[in-house]
Image (cartoon, rainbow, N blue to C red):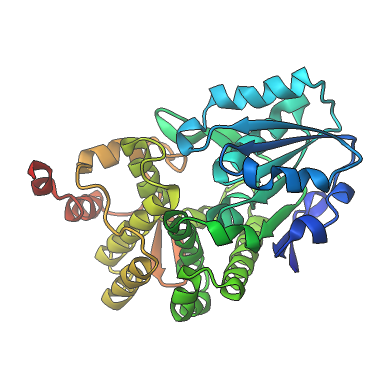
Amino acid sequence: MRQLTVELGERSYPIYVGENLFKTVDLQGLIKGKQVMIVSNETIAPLYLDQLKQQLPDLQVDEVILPDGESFKTLEHLNSIFDALLRMKHNRTTTLIALGGGVVGDMTGFAAASYQRGVDFIQIPTTLLSQVDSSVGGKTGVNHPLGKNMIGAFYQPKAVLADTKILRSLPPRELAAGLAEVIKYGLIYDETFLNWIEANIEQLNNLEPKALAEAIYRSCKIKAEVVAQDEREGGIRAILNLGHTFGHAIETDQGYGTWLHGEAVGAGMQMAADLSNRLGWMSDSDLARTQAILKAAHLPTEPPPSMEPQRFIELMSVDKKVLDGRIRLVLLKRIGEAVITDSFDPALLQQTLEQHYAPETLTE
C-alpha cells in the first residue's frame, strides 16, 4: 500500500493506493460517529457491499443502492439519498461512504455537503477514472439537462481508498475512459509521466497490477499538488479540465451515458490539441503524439460526426468556465504545459470544429 496526502490545512486527507484496502486500512478509525450510510449502485453493491460492511462491525450501517449510469446523476436520484438518511434518522456525526464510480462519488459527496449542512464522507472509487480523478479534489454534484455538473459544491472527503484489485473486472470501455484522465495529467503537467504512459500502455491496457498502481499513484499525486494550490478552481486547477469543455458538450448533446465521460474527454483533448496547434503553440509532432497515445489507449479522437460546429458552440457557452460571456478553454503550449485562456481567434476554434465535423457520414 502507498499513501499520499492532499494538503489542505485542517481539511487535509489521505489517499491510499493498493490491493485489499478494506482489510489494510482501518475504516472504523476514519469514522467519528456511530452511523454510516453506504451509497452504491446496482452493479457494484452485489460485488463489494458485504465485504465493506464486514469492516464496520460496531456501527449502524445503512445503505442506498442507486441505478447504475450517468443518466441517473440527477437531483431526483440525489433525493433518494436524503430520503434514506432521514428515514434512518442519521444525525450530524454520520459518515457517508461512496462505493462506486464517479457518479456515485459525485452524488454522495454532494449529499454529504448538503445533509444537515455538512457531514463526513469517504470515497471508495471502483473505476479507474474515479480513482485517478473524480474521487480526489472535492468536486461534487449532479447533472442538469442543460449542462453537466452544473449543480454541486466543493466538499472534500475524509479519505480516498483506491483499491487496484477492484479494477481487475473493469470492462474495456471503462478502462479506456479512465486512461483518458491518466493521459491528461501527462499532457498538462508532466511530460516525464507521459513518457512512462507511452512505454507502459500495453501493461495498462492489460490491467497489469504494478503498472496500474503506479499510474494511479502518480495521477493522484499530480492532482493533489494542483488542488493544494487552488482548491476552488480560481486559477491553476482549471488546467485539470483539458478537453472537458469539448467533452461535456459531447456528453450533453449525445445524452448522458451514451459516451462515457473519459471517451468524450479523449476526443475533447484531441480537439484542444488541434486548436493549440492552429494557434501556433503545439508542434505538429506533439499533435500527432497526442493522437497516437489516445488511440493506443483505445479512445476516440473524433467527436460524433452528427455534432455541427454551432451545436458545439451553443453547449460550450454553458460550460462552468465561461466568464462574462467568453468561452475559456484549457489549451497546450506544448506537452506538459497547459494554459487557461479566452484569448484565441474564434475563427480558429471554428476551423477545429469544422475539421472534426463529417456530415457526409450521416446519409449512410
Which residue sits at x=21%, y=43%? 309
Residue 181 in the figure: left or right of residue 317: right
Which residue sits at x=54%, y=32%? 67
Q: Nearer the viewer, residue 163 or 342?
A: 163
Compared to residue 332, the image places residue 138 above or below, namely: above
Compared to residue 217, the image places residue 107 above or below, namely: above
Residue 161 in the figure: left or right of residue 173: right
Residue 30's x, y, as percent?
85, 49
Which residue sits at x=55%, y=73%? 208
Residue 6 is at least partly visible in this image: no
Q: Nearer the viewer, residue 164 or 259?
A: 164
Q: Quadrant of the N terminus?
A: bottom right
Residue 257's x, y, as percent?
41, 40
Asked where in the image residue 39 lies, by quadrant, the reply is top right
Q: Quadrant of the C terminus?
A: top left
Q: Nearer the viewer, residue 124 or 180?
A: 124
Residue 263 is at least partly visible in this image: yes
Residue 224 in the figure: left or right of residue 247: right
Asked where in the image residue 330 lies, by quadrant, the reply is bottom left
Residue 201's x, y, as percent?
45, 74
Q: Nearer the viewer, residue 226 or 22?
A: 22
Number of labelled discs? 0
Which residue sits at x=41%, y=47%? 260
Residue 170's x, y, as percent?
52, 56
